[in-house]
Amino acid sequence: MTDDPFRFFYRLRVRWGECDMQGIVFNPRYMEFVDAAFTEYWRAIGMPYPDAFLTGGTDTFMVAANIEYRDAARFDDELDIFIRTEYFGTTSFRIGFSIRRGSDVLVHGSGAYVNGDRTSRAPTKLPQALIDKVTAYEHTPPLRKA
């Protein structure tokens, strides 16, 4: 067992078009990397997005994001984007992420999501299947609303 709370990661290589005039990854691109990794995380836990939510008539909507930049990635860097579910509420959950080049953490942060009706976006209770699959997958259990 490791002290690292992350089990899942998605690897990608930085493409030229993702860099700015300084030759480093343009800041908003990091959230695109997180989004790509999060899609693969859904698949890894057995809840492929968006199909796993369609039967319940819900979807997930990002309502907040926090990102801290420590260092920059550059063209052709190989990055690992780590994702984990950190917290479950009644209708919401929070993911944590860490973008690394080797052992160096370049970016880390979190994203808060609300499960909601696909049409009205009204908050809806999280599917029990999601909670069960995440809990079975993660080696560091998500915190739960008391």
Image: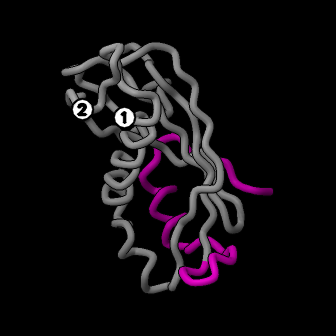
> Which span is picked out in magenta?
117-146
Location of residue 53 by image quarter: bottom left
Q: Is residue 130 visible?
A: yes
Dot 1: element: strand
Q: Is residue 131 magenta?
A: yes
Identify the residue at horizontal 75%, vertical 56% (top origin): 145
Identify the residue at horizontal 45%, vertical 13% (top origin): 71
Q: Residues within 10 Å of mark 1 (few under 14, many from 20)?
A: many
Q: How is the image coloured?
A: one colour
As measured in the structure, the alpha-carbon distance from the residue carrying label 1 to the one carrying label 2 is 19 Å
Q: Is residue 5 left or right of residue 42?
A: right
Q: Position of residue 128 (x, y in %)?
A: 56, 73
Disc 1: which residue: 81
Task: Tell which circle, 1 or 2, labels the residue nearer the N-terminal end.
Answer: 2
Q: Position of residue 82 (x, y in %)?
A: 40, 35
Disc 2: which residue: 17
Q: Is residue 25 above or below residue 11?
A: above
